[in-house]
Each structure stands twice: as C-alpha cells, then as structure tokens.
Image (tube, rainbow, N blue to C red):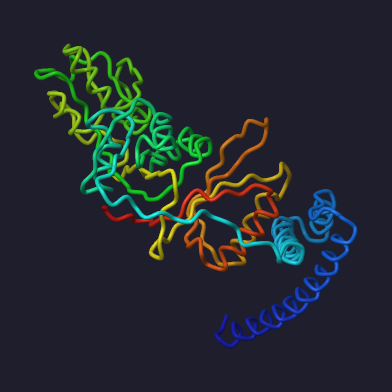
Amino acid sequence: MSTEQLKDVREQINAIDEQMIALLHQRQTLADDVARIKRANNIALVDPRREQEVVEKVAAMVPEEERADAMIFQRMVMGLSKSRQRLRLYGTAEEYSFPTPRQPKAETPLVAFQGVRGAWAEKAAMQLFADASLTNLETWEDVFSAVSDGDADYGVLPIENSQTGGIGEVYDLLRKYGCYIVGQTWVKIDHCLMAAPGTKLSDVREVFSHPEGFKQCRKFLRGKSWDLTGCRNTAVAAERVATEGSPRYAAIGSERAAELNGLSVIARDIVSDPSNRTRFILVAAQPEYDDTCDTVSVIFRTAHRSGALCDVLFPLLSEGINMTRLESRPTSEKGKYCFFCDLECHISETRVQDAFRQIGACCGYLEILGCYRQDTPQR
C-alpha cells in the first residue's frame, strides 16, 4: 500500500470518527433525559438485565469474528452513558471525603514489624527510617493492632512480591483495622540457605522458612528430598536452626539473619528469580500526605453481575487516571469480592474527586486507604 493510499484510508477513518463523536454526543444528551426520568420516578441507575439484552443484540448484528469487539464497544458506550447519568444524579454531592492529614512524627518514632531481628521487614523499616525505635511483634495482625491502638506509631508489612504476587492476609487486615498507607518501599530478596557451622549440603534433612520463602526458592528446592517446615518468618526460621544446632537442619532467609544467629551460609543466591523483590507498606492510624504524593490506594466492592468492574474502571479511563495494580479478595459474603487498587494520582485533584464520586455512586462502597509517594524517601 502506497503512502497516498494510506492517507486516503486514514481520511476515511477520520470521517467515520467524526460521525461517531456526533452520534455519541446525541446519545449522551439522551442520557441526560434518562437521568431526569429516573430521578423523577425513583428508578435505579443500573438495569443489568437491559444491559445484557442490548449487548447480546449488538453481538448478533456483526460477523462472529467481530462479536467480541462489538460487545466491548457497546459496554464502553453504555459505561459512558451511566457515567453521564451519575453526574446528573449525583453531581451536586459533596466532594469525596478523606481525613485531614497529620504531620509525620517529628521525634524518634516507634516502628513495629513482624518477626525477629534479621527479618526482611526489619530491613524495610531501616530503608524507610534513618532513626527509629524498632519493635518486633509475633504476627501481622499484632502489627496492625499496635498501630490502631496507638502502641506503635507506624507498622511495616509486606503486601506484594514480584514473583508470588499479593499477600492476601495483609490486604484483609488493612480492611479490618482501618489503618492508612503512608509510604512504601521495595526490598530485594536474596535468600540464602543457612545452617550450623560445619554443615554440608549433604547433611541437611529438614529446612525451615516462611511459606513465601519456599515459593521464591522453588527451583533450588526442586529434586531435593528435604522436609519443608513453615515458620512465621524467615528470621524465626534462622533462630530455630540456631537453637537446634544440628547439621540436619537448615533455614532459608537473609544473610543478616544468618549473621545474627551465628549460622553459616551454605548456599547463596537461591531465589528462582534474581530480580525478586517484596513491596512493603508503611501504615499509620491517621493519613499523612502532602503535594509530593503521587499514589492513591483504594478498596471498593462491586455488584455481583456482568460488567460491574467495568463500571468502576470507566471513570478512571475518562479522567485519565492510570491504575498500576488491581487485587481481588473474597468477602464474607459467598461469591462476592472486593478490590484493592493503586492509582497514579493525588487525592486532592479535581479529576480524582470526580472519578471517586462516580465510582462511589456506581459500586456503593469505596474507601481510600492512603495517599503516599510511590518512591517513599527515608525519613
């Protein structure tokens, strides 16, 4: 195809686009009329049965190979219509509220993490704070409880691993305790195999670690007839091996944990993926944010129907808000899920407020978990 032919085809596409935009304007104007009728007659904003009928009708109008495209297109158009209706129905509502931020603690803060000295969470805390008092607690829930009750100023918890994905329990505890995310950091995970001094690889019969540690080192463990015993934390696993003092036991964890417990490293760099990293979040009882923050984390719940998630995503699309992460978690109601989402934006932006207002009207439940810097500097 020559350049002139390509230019001609593009001009035809431009002409079709102009017609489509004009028709979209007409359709959106009719959506205003629909909103007025729904308000006057107290009719629900969303009618899932009608939406499905419309989508199926459109799918039947095109060749089979184009049906998926037609269905996506139709859902997008209907999503824009519903967003327009929400704007007309709820546009006078108050801005989506978020608590006023407090200033970061000026004096030496008390920072809680799960595990013992040598845990990856301790390293994350040291990356986030140049000067802080660190306290180690037994479980992730203990960390959230301490922050919520005011027994600790901050908590550091793992929430995502680049190899194994999201850590569901931490997401659930965020929702349960109502803490706010005020920062984050990534820690490079370079596990090693450690054991009592003088231990050879052939001596090992049982290995201790956190279940995530086993997952992250699956290639190294493949083919080895070792018993794998889970612990609350990789540093706790190191402590246990040091206490046992037998060459039959080894642990997977950090070299710092080996050093702190007087153990020898018998295998280095055993992670399956050399780029393995874990994302740790910093949580507080109250939000802390300023103009430099560029990330907002939210949780929302959708209706249990086809296209419900699309309804939430359309306002983000229309307002030009980039979503960097979406994680689903089951709720206490059978078959229903909530979603955790990270967005590149600031909570005070008008476009963000507009999108949240539309999402809140669409899904019925939306909660902001925090506004913070993606690359949180050391305090």
Q: Vertical placement of 327 versus 221: above or below?
A: below
Is residue 351 or residue 259 the one in the foreground? Answer: 351
Q: Vertical placement of 301 versus 39: above or below?
A: above
Is residue 299 or residue 210 the one in the foreground? Answer: 299
Please tell me which residue is depicted at 76% across the width and 76% down the height of the picture.
25
Which residue lies most toward the right here? 41
Q: Is residue 38 left or right of residue 68?
A: right
State the image coordinates of residue 226 (x, y, percent, origin top left): 30, 16
- Quadrant location of the N terminus in the rendered image: bottom right
Please tell me which residue is depicted at 62% across the width and 38% down the height of the picture.
337
State the image coordinates of residue 240 (x, y, percent, origin top left): 24, 17
Q: Vertical placement of 226 versus 82: above or below?
A: above
Is residue 255 or residue 172 the one in the foreground? Answer: 172
The quarter of the picture where residue 146 lies is top left
The quarter of the picture where residue 77 lies is bottom right
Which residue lies most toward the bottom here? 4
State the image coordinates of residue 138 (x, y, percent, origin top left): 34, 25
Q: Is residue 325 left or right of residue 366?
A: left
State the image coordinates of residue 191 (x, y, percent, origin top left): 25, 34
Is residue 343 or residue 69 the one in the foreground? Answer: 343
Q: How many marks?
A: 0
Q: Vertical placement of 41 versus 14: above or below?
A: above
